[in-house]
Amino acid sequence: MDKGLVKLAPSILSADFIHLGQQVAEAEQAGADRIHIDVMDGHFVPNLSMGPSVVQSLRRVTRLPLEIHLMISTPDLFFDEFVEAGRIPSLFTGKAMPMCTAQSNASRHWVNVPEWSSTWRPLRQCWTKSFRTSIKCWS
Amino acid sequence: MTVNPGFGHQQFIHTTLPKIRRVRGMIDERTQGCEVEVDGGINAATAPLAVAAGSHVLMAGTAIFNESETVTAAMDRLRAGIQLWQQLQPVE
């Protein structure tokens, strides 16, 4: 990995939701490397944000990897739905923070295997594996 | 996470920097090509600190989506801050 190259992941939590599609498209044009989507359930963290429908809509306006940050108490219940909505190339959750493993492995799978049907299986394996071997880096 | 998760517009927690360095070190001992991403409080001032600590994927919310400048201008400013810091580093 080129240590000099820094990737930017704009988080839409701060975006103007009236113009969400437009802002994400602008971020892509400006050279964003991925779009970060904070998913909150009001239980795992004290705030509510967005769900799979937003991910599904954003998939239509950008080809960038959608990075779904699941800050929810039951990520396993919603995992499939988010995968389906965003064809997720990268995904991590708050509790176990398996972001390093999940992201690098998942991105590779997604890029190499364009077919959705064959994509999610390695993703899932990656997900469960990450949970077991996760590195905690909570603030 | 470099803020307490849940809300945008938070200040970067500087005590996470040694943790980023430690995670980077643990990863580098075991594997290559693994990214460390920071999430929270990243702006033109804190981005170079995170990069210096070993993170090369920066999540930024308010620093990119805000009312005072366009998304493009904000991203350019963020990148410029990081590049300036990188240029100031002594060559190994």
Image (cartoon, coloured by chain):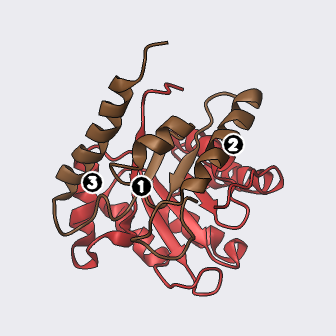
Chain colours: A red, B brown
Mark 2 or 3: in front is 2
- Secondary structure under tag 3 reads helix
Question: Are marks 2 and 1 in one subunit?
Answer: yes
Q: Is residue B51 left or right of residue A96?
A: left
Q: What is the chain identity of the residue bearing mark 3?
A: A
Find disc 3 in the rendering and name its residue: A27
**Where residue B55 sits in the image (x, y, percent)?**
54, 41
Residue B23: which numbered mark, if any?
A: 2
Quote the CA–CA distance across marks 2 and 1: 18 Å
**Where residue B58 sits in the image (x, y, percent)?**
45, 48
Residue at the spot 55% in from the left edge and 64% down from the top edge: A69
| Circle 1: residue type | Ile
| Circle 3: residue type | Ala
Q: What is the chain identity of the residue bearing mark 2?
A: B
Q: Are marks 2 and 3 in contact (CB under 8 Å)?
A: no
Q: Nearer the viewer, residue A22 or A60?
A: A22
Quote the CA–CA distance across marks 1 and 3: 16 Å
Tell me if residue A10 comes above or below residue B62 in the rendering.
above
Residue at the spot 71% in from the left edge and 56% down from the top edge: A124
Residue at the spot 50% in from the left edge and 85% down from the top edge: A48
Tell me if residue B51 comes above or below residue A87 in the rendering.
above
Marked residue nearer the N-terminal end (2 or 1): 2
Quarter of the image for residue A120 reads: bottom right
Q: Residue furthest right?
A: A132
Residue at the spot 32% in from the left edge and 56% down from the top edge: A62
At label 3, counting other C-alpha atoms closer than 10 Å, the crowd grade (few under 14, some 14-19, many 20 or more) is: many
**Where residue A116 sits in the image (x, y, percent)?**
55, 54
Q: Is residue A96 left or right of residue A9?
A: right
Tell me if residue A25 comes above or below residue B8 in the rendering.
above
